[in-house]
Image (cartoon, grey):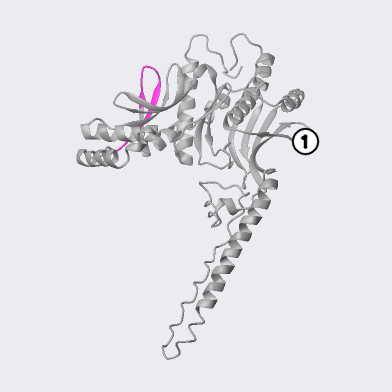
């Protein structure tokens, strides 16, 4: 949603500002007459210019390695000849060199891998400083507007901040221009991440949400649905550790790993064991919708960690699906919940299966739409 009082064209121009200049002009020219926007994430390869400098050094390293292996081989041959001056003493036969291990050919690293669908390729046995790498993976975004005879246009994203800003901008354009939107990963195989429509609040049709199925799904997964004065919470309580075992872990961690105290995750684990040792109630993962925001957090003993939230006034969509990462390896991650806001996309770092993730998404969307419809002066759509 744009700023209060801003026209649709002003909001679109503001969203387009997050895209590269060439993409901005191309998309602006195609919006007139368009009724659908397709966003495809592609794992591409780009030539690594640094390889021109590293190639001679790696050739030299391989030459040294081969020379060392040849020297070891010749030493084994000469040591097997024995001592000719000691003919009466039987010579022990020198042990034969062990056969070199056979390594199965690893899969092509340029082929994208879905964590939840196929196994990751085995790591190469060759150390990184000896490997020849002439390409580097890049995250490319392809945009198609329809109906249009113009070919798709692409742009490369470097870095998580730029990538999330670009995706949020495309969602904002589709929402304000009232376009159908399809976001998918190229694969293989191609996987649809989200389908939405800018004419609808949060780009989803409330009639398509199966709330009865969603409630039964989250209940079967151990989540508790709690209606609060502020909204809705989906809580999943953790199983606490017994007091005796908690003290053992607590003392062991302090004795063995005090150097890890600077890590936030280590301090959180340490604090949880301390709460277990004191007999405090277990912590809980919480997906929430309140009067101000939508998000996720971990709560225990009045403390909150890992909070990810988007103000409701800035929420464009709630998406669940596999995401092609914007990291250096452009890796495919497990399906996660994403909150698309104005200017960025916020990923909830919590692994969810396909059924549970879709159920949580449906319940959060339903709660936001229900509370919006009861607000005084609420409009029929949050996309305008």
Q: Nearer the viewer, residue 299 or 83?
A: 83
Instruction: Answer whether residue 230 is magenta in the image.
Output: yes
Counting from the top left corner in percent of width and height, residue 382 is at 57, 18
Q: Residue furthest right?
A: 149
Instruction: Tell me which residue sits at (67%, 21%) in the image.
Output: 17
Q: Magenta residues?
A: 226-239
Q: Does 263 sit above or below residue 289? A: below
Is 35 covered by the magenta stretch? no
Mark 1 — residue?
A: 151
Vertical placement of residue 164 versus 118, above or below: above
Question: At which x and y percent is residue 304?
Answer: 36, 25
Question: Relative to residue 376, is residue 7 drawn left or right?
Answer: right
> Is residue 69 found left or right of 46 in the rendered image?
left
Q: Quadrant of the C terminus?
A: top right
Circle 1 residues within 10 Å: few <14, some 14–19, many ≥20: few
Left or right: 219 with respect to 281? right
Q: Position of residue 4 (x, y in %)?
A: 59, 10
For the point 64% across and 30% down, which residue is it?
A: 181
Question: Which x, y percent locates residue 137?
Answer: 63, 43
Residue found farthest to the bottom: 88
């Amino acid at each position: 949603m744009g700023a209060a009082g801003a026209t649709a064209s002003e909001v679109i121009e503001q969203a387009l500002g997050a895209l590269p200049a060439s993409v901005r002009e191309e998309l602006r020219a195609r919006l007139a007459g368009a009724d659908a926007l397709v966003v495809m994430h592609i794992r591409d390869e780009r030539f690594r210019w640094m390889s021109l400098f590293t190639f001679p050094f790696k050739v030299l390293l391989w030459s040294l390695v081969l020379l060392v292996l040849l020297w070891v081989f010749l030493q084994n041959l000469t040591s097997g000849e024995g001592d000719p001056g000691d003919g009466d003493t039987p010579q022990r036969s020198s042990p034969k060199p062990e056969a070199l291990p056979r390594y199965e050919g690893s899969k092509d690293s340029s082929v994208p891998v879905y964590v939840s669908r196929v196994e990751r390729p085995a790591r190469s046995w060759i150390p990184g400083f000896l490997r020849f790498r002439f390409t580097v993976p890049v995250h490319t975004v392809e945009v198609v507007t329809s109906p249009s005879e113009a070919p798709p246009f692409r742009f490369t994203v470097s870095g998580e901040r730029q990538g999330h800003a670009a995706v949020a901008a495309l969602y904002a354009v589709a929402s304000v221009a009232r376009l159908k939107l399809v976001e998918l990963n190229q694969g293989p195989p191609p996987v649809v991440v989200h389908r939405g429509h800018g004419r609808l609040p949060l780009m989803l049709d409330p009639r398509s949400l199966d709330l009865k199925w969603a409630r039964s799904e989250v209940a079967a997964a151990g989540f508790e649905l709690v209606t609060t004065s502020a909204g809705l919470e989906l809580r999943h309580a953790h199983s606490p550790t017994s007091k005796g075992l908690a003290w053992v872990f607590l003392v062991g961690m302090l004795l063995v790993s005090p150097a890890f105290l600077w890590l936030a995750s280590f301090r959180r684990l340490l604090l949880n064991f301390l709460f277990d040792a004191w007999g405090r109630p277990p912590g809980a993962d919480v997906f929430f919708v309140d009067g101000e925001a939508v998000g996720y957090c971990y709560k225990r003993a009045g403390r909150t960690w890992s909070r990810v939230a988007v103000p409701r006034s800035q929420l464009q969509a709630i998406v669940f699906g596999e995401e092609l990462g914007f990291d250096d390896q452009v890796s495919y991650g497990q399906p996660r919940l994403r909150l698309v806001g104005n200017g960025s996309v916020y990923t909830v770092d919590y692994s969810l299966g396909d059924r549970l993730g879709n159920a949580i998404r449906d319940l959060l969307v339903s709660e936001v739409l229900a509370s919006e419809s009861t607000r005084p002066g609420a409009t029929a759509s949050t996309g305008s």
